[in-house]
Image (cartoon, rainbow, N blue to C red):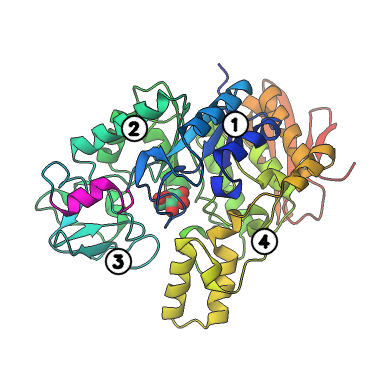
C-alpha cells in the first residue's frame, strides 16, 4: 500500500450541511484525495467553532443527522475517499453531561476533569487565566482554551475508556480514522497530589511521557488512519513529537511551525515581516525523512496566500515538491484563496479567538482601529468563509487555474518516483525570496526553484533541464 495519502480538510460550516458536503465530493475527488478530514460535526454550543463538544456521538443538527452522515460516507466510498473525524481529546464543552455531573461531584464523574482547590498562574491559549472558579463544585478547573472548554483528566482510566468507546462508535459507522486535536497536551504529573509545577503554563503538559502513553492506549491497536495536531512549539519539538508517537499516529502536522508568518492563536500580535531565509533553512532541516504531514493553512490560520503574500502556485509547489507522505490541503487553498475583507466591527466575528484577541489588545491600550487592524490580519475567521462554488467550477474548466496546477502537482507527487521518494538537497542562492533545492533519486536529479518574491518564475526541471512545471503562464 502506498504511503502517500493526501488529506483534504473541510471546515463544515463553510460548505453547509453533511448533504451539501456530500454533493461537493465529486468535485473534491478530482484532486485525488485519500481522506477528507471534517472539522467537528458533533453536538456543540459552538463557542469555539465546534471544538467545544457537548456529545461526541451525536451530530449537531446544523449539519443533519446520522442518516446524512451515512450518506456522506457512502458517497466518499464511491470515490475511494475515507472520512476522518476530528477528535477533541484535551477538553469537552462545559455543556457536556460529563462536566455537568462532575460539577455536582457525581461519584462516577467527579474526577473526569482537572479540579484544584487553588488555581495555578497559568495562561490559557486564548488569553486570560487557565483556571476558573466553578460555583457549583466550589473548586477551580483547568481550561487551556476558553473557559467553556474544561480540560479532561486523562489520569482517570474512565476518561480513556470513554474515548475508546467513542473511537469504536465511529469506526463501526464507516469512519476511516481521526485527526486528533491538541494531541500533545493531555496530561502530566502536574496534577498528582503534592506536585509543585515547574513553570507556569501549558508547557507543564507538553509532550510528556504520560501523554504519549495515553495516545498509545487509545490508538496503537486500532486499524484506522490517525493524524495528530501537536500545538505550540517549534519544528524541533514537532519532530520530536512525531518520533515519540510513531506507534499511536500515522502522521503528524507541521502546522504552527510556519512561524515565519504564523499568527496562530494570536500569540504574536505584531504583523510580522517574513524572514524567508530563516524559514527555508528550517524547512530544509526538518522536512526530510518525511517527518511531517505538510500543511500550509488550516481553519486556525489566516490564508497562506495572504500570510506569505505570494503567488498561490508557489505555495502549491512548496507543499508538493518538498518530501511529504501526508500533505493536507485546506478547503479553498486549491483555489488560491486569499483573506477576504473582514468587517471592522468585532461583533461580526463568530470566532472566540478573534473576540478574545480584540479584548486583550484593547486592555493593553490599543485603539479600536489598531486592535481591529491586527484582528483582521490574524483572525482565524479569515479561513472560515463560505466557498464560492461557481469560482470552483470556473477553475475546474480553466487549464491555467490554480486548481488545475494543484492537480498536476498532486499527480507528480504520487506518480513521479523522484518527487515521491527522492532525497532533498538544498542549493545555495543569492536571491532573498528564493528557495532552491534538488530532489534526488537513484542518480536522477530534479531541480526546483521557488521564488516567493515572484521576480522569476518558479520551476521544476528534470535532469535533462526540461521544465516539468512552471508558474509562468502557458
Ligand atoms: C485545536 C483546533 C482549534 C481549537 C483548539 C481548541 O487547535 O484546531 O480550532 O480552537 O484546538 O479545541
Q: Is mark 1 within 8 Å of ligand 1?
A: no
Q: Quadrant of the N terminus?
A: top right
- Earlier-in-chain disc, 1 versus 3: 1
- Marks 2 and 3 sit apart, C-alpha to C-alpha, by 30 Å
Q: Is mark 2 within 8 Å of ligand 1?
A: no
- Marks 1 and 4 sit apart, C-alpha to C-alpha, by 26 Å
Q: Residue at x 29, y 40 (%)?
A: 211
Residue of label 2:
166
Disc nearest the viewer among 2 and 3: 2
Q: Residue at x 56, y 63 (%)?
A: 378
Disc nearest the viewer among 4 and 2: 2
Q: Position of residue 83 (x, y in %)?
A: 52, 30
Q: Secondary structure at mark 2?
A: helix
Q: Does the magenta portion include 120?
A: no
Residue of label 3:
129
Disc nearest the viewer among 1 and 2: 2
The one nearer the camera, 361 or 413, is 361
Q: Look at the image and give the residue range highlighted in magenta.
A: 91-105
Q: Does the magenta portion include 100?
A: yes
Q: Is residue 168 left or right of residue 236?
A: left
Whether residue 122 is visible to the viewer of this picture, yes or no, is yes
Q: Secondary structure at mark 3?
A: loop
The one nearer the camera, 62 or 434, is 62
- Earlier-in-chain disc, 1 versus 4: 1
Q: Which mark is residue 161?
A: none
- Marks 4 and 3 sit apart, C-alpha to C-alpha, by 32 Å
What is the crowding at mark 4: few (fewer than 14 residues within 10 Å), some, or many (at least 20)? Answer: some
Residue of label 1:
6
Residue of label 4:
340
Disc nearest the viewer among 1 and 4: 4
- Marks 1 and 3 sit apart, C-alpha to C-alpha, by 38 Å
Residue 126 appears in which quarter of the rendering? bottom left
Amino acid at each position: 500500500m502506498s504511503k502517500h495519502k493526501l488529506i483534504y480538510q473541510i471546515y463544515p460550516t463553510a460548505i453547509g450541511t453533511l448533504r451539501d458536503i456530500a454533493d461537493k465530493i465529486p468535485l473534491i475527488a478530482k484532486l485525488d484525495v485519500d481522506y477528507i478530514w471534517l472539522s467537528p460535526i458533533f453536538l456543540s454550543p459552538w463557542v469555539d467553532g465546534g471544538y467545544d463538544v457537548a456529545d461526541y456521538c451525536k451530530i449537531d443538527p446544523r449539519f443533519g443527522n446520522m442518516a446524512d452522515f451515512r450518506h456522506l460516507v457512502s458517497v466518499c466510498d464511491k470515490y475511494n475517499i475515507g472520512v476522518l473525524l476530528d477528535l477533541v481529546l484535551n477538553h469537552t464543552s462545559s455543556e457536556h453531561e460529563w462536566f455537568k455531573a462532575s460539577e455536582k461531584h457525581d461519584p462516577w464523574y467527579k474526577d473526569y476533569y482537572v479540579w484544584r482547590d487553588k488555581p495555578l498562574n497559568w495562561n490559557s491559549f486564548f488569553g486570560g487565566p487557565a483556571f476558573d472558579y466553578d460555583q457549583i463544585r466550589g473548586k477551580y478547573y483547568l481550561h487551556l482554551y476558553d473557559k467553556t472548554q474544561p480540560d479532561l483528566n486523562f489520569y482517570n482510566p474512565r476518561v480513556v475508556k470513554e474515548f475508546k468507546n467513542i473511537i469504536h462508535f465511529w469506526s463501526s459507522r464507516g469512519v476511516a480514522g481521526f485527526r486528533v486535536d491538541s494531541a500533545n497536551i493531555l496530561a502530566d504529573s502536574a496534577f498528582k497530589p503534592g506536585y509543585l509545577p515547574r513553570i507556569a503554563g501549558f508547557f507543564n503538559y507538553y509532550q510528556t511521557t504520560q501523554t504519549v502513553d495515553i495516545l498509545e492506549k487509545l490508538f496503537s491497536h486500532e486499524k484506522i488512519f490517525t493524524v495528530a495536531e501537536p500545538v505550540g512549539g517549534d519544528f524541533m519539538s514537532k519532530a520530536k513529537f512525531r518520533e515519540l508517537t510513531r506507534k499511536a499516529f500515522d502522521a503528524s502536522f507541521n502546522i504552527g511551525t510556519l512561524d515565519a508568518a504564523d499568527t496562530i492563536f494570536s500569540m504574536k500580535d505584531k504583523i510580522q515581516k517574513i524572514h524567508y531565509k530563516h524559514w527555508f533553512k528550517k524547512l530544509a532541516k526538518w522536512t526530510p525523512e518525511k517527518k511531517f504531514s505538510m500543511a500550509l493553512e488550516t481553519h486556525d490560520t489566516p490564508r497562506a496566500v495572504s500570510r506569505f503574500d505570494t503567488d498561490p502556485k508557489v505555495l502549491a509547489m512548496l507543499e508538493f515538491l518538498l518530501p511529504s507522505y501526508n500533505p493536507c490541503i485546506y478547503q479553498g487553498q486549491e483555489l488560491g484563496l486569499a483573506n477576504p475583507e473582514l468587517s471592522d466591527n468585532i461583533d461580526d466575528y463568530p470566532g472566540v479567538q478573534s473576540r478574545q484577541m480584540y479584548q486583550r489588545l484593547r486592555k493593553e491600550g490599543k485603539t479600536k482601529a489598531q486592535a481591529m487592524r491586527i484582528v483582521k490580519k490574524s483572525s482565524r475567521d479569515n479561513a472560515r468563509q463560505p466557498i464560492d462554488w461557481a469560482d470552483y467550477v470556473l477553475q475546474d474548466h480553466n487549464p491555467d487555474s490554480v486548481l488545475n496546477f494543484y492537480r498536476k502537482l498532486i499527480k507528480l507527487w504520487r506518480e513521479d518516483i523522484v518527487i515521491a521518494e527522492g532525497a532533498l538537497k538544498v542549493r545555495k542562492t543569492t536571491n532573498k525570496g528564493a528557495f532552491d533545492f534538488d530532489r534526488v533519486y537513484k542518480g536522477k536529479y530534479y531541480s526546483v526553484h521557488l521564488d516567493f518574491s515572484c521576480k522569476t518564475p518558479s520551476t521544476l526541471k528534470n535532469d535533462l533541464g526540461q521544465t516539468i512545471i512552471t508558474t509562468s503562464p502557458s
